[in-house]
Image (spheres, grey):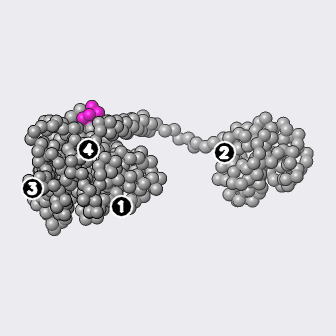
Amino acid sequence: MQPGALGDVPERKKSASDRKGRKMKYGYLYYRKGLLEHKKERPMNLGDPIQSMAVLGILRKIGIQEEDIIPVDRYDLAVYKGEKVILIVNGIEMYEHYAYHTRFLPVSENIIPVFVGIHLHRELTEEELASFREHQPVGCRDEFTVSFLREKGIDAFLTGCLTLTFPRRQETAAQNKVFLVDCPETVPQYMPEELAKDAVCLSQIIRIKSESESCRLTDGETDYYLKTAEKQLYRLRDEAALVVTSRLHVATPCAAMGIPVVLVKEVFDGRFRFIDRFLPLYTPEKYGQIDWRPNLCIGEEVKEEIVSVCRCLIGLAAGRERLKNIYRGGKQDIFFRTEEEEAVCSLPMKPEEEFAYAIWGVCMPNSYLLYEAMRKKYVNARMVCAIDTWAEGIFKDSVPIISPEDIEKRLGKETLIFVVAPAAHEAAVKRLEGRGYRFALMKGVEVRMF
């Protein structure tokens, strides 16, 4: 398998803020990491750019042309000023912004976000929640995030991590090494000797000493970060017979590529609440039970479904944007309200007045619209019952429904009766007129008071 098949990150194009053009662009997250003001060296996890590679692979699979794909700085989504872009927003959002002064949400108006494969673990502001609500549904990496967002009233569903979509590797004789990637120190003692003796130790964490004059890595340093991630992932793809790791973004892409993986960790947090469907999760008390010859991989149907969901969500985002542009502007200066609201405005009572009323004709939706209009304008008015020949039981807010035959027994003469069903007008006039009842016949915006 040649480099490129994994969705490798291209040489950095002009940043999205440097480009001009009207054709819709599609973006992936570009991890230009933040730096502390007085500390220009920091550790960085290669899992972040590996997720960029996964998104690039998905965009290519769904037919996005290379010239239409652009990088968008992960840490400036809220202040992005570049050209309009549909952006797959994946990865993890926790508390990094407190240390590195970055802003993730709400996204800039020039970004149309497609939230898919995202993990969240921090309190969100109302502005941030509003951004999720505006662009839901949200595809979540793990069940922890699904529950977190659903509790806040956001439509969320489980997708798993987008690194599950990496293509299966071609098997070769060169794939004969055992790699320990950030493996807990006690694990090798449980390994068969033939596996442990020549195992290669790697880390997913690298340190970069930055020469940047700002609070971010330079573009060159960021490109080095991306290419280092590519190089390590390619090495595992091309040389590994077995990978033993505590890192999620080693385990998922390796399993997707068909590399035997053992996932070991002192404790597994909510980020891993999807990968347990595909791999055993080994904590210290289970190290003695590890299967050192795992025959596990991610099925092609899983990859196809994730790519299909991404295609649908991108299509939905593009369609929403087109409709937004269609309906932008051209609005007429009209005050929109229901006929019932208009009719209520013509009633002779004062808005603060206290009175009892009833509605005749609850089988029609007009009765409910009238009830809403009355509650809005006459806050001190009280609906005492509903009247209908055919319905019985409860109307709204525990208001009873009575038969027209029971009006004399149940209603006082001071109750104002609104007759909203035109078919009941004649019967209402016969029953109520001349007997001291106040009533109103309603049809559309027309109100005839008696």
The residue positioned 18% from the left and 50% from the top of the image is 243
Label 3 SS: loop
* Residue 69 picture location, percent across and down: 23, 38
Quadrant in the picture for residue 25? top left
Q: Residues within 10 Å of mark 4 (few under 14, many from 20)?
A: some
- Quadrant where the N terminus sits is top left
Label 2 SS: helix
Mark in the foreground, 2 or 4:
4
* Residue 407 picture location, percent across and down: 85, 49
Label 1 SS: loop
Q: Residues within 10 Å of mark 2 (few under 14, many from 20)?
A: some
Label 4 SS: loop
Mark in the foreground, 1 or 3:
3
Between the C-alphas of marks 2 and 4, the distance is 59 Å
Sequence-first disc among 3 and 4: 3
Vertical position of residue 16 compared to residue 103: above or below? above
Between the C-alphas of marks 3 and 4, the distance is 23 Å
Q: Is residue 163 left or right of residue 326?
A: left
Type of amino acid at the residue the image marks with label 1: Arg
Between the C-alphas of marks 1 and 4, the distance is 33 Å
Check residue 331 for magenta coloring. no
Where residue 369 is drawn, which disc sits there? Answer: 2
Q: Which residues are magenta?
A: 59-64
Mark 4 highlights which residue? 296
Type of amino acid at the residue the image marks with label 2: Leu
Mark 1 highlights which residue? 122
Sequence-first disc among 2 and 3: 3
Type of amino acid at the residue the image marks with label 4: Leu
Residue 279 in view (yes/no):
yes
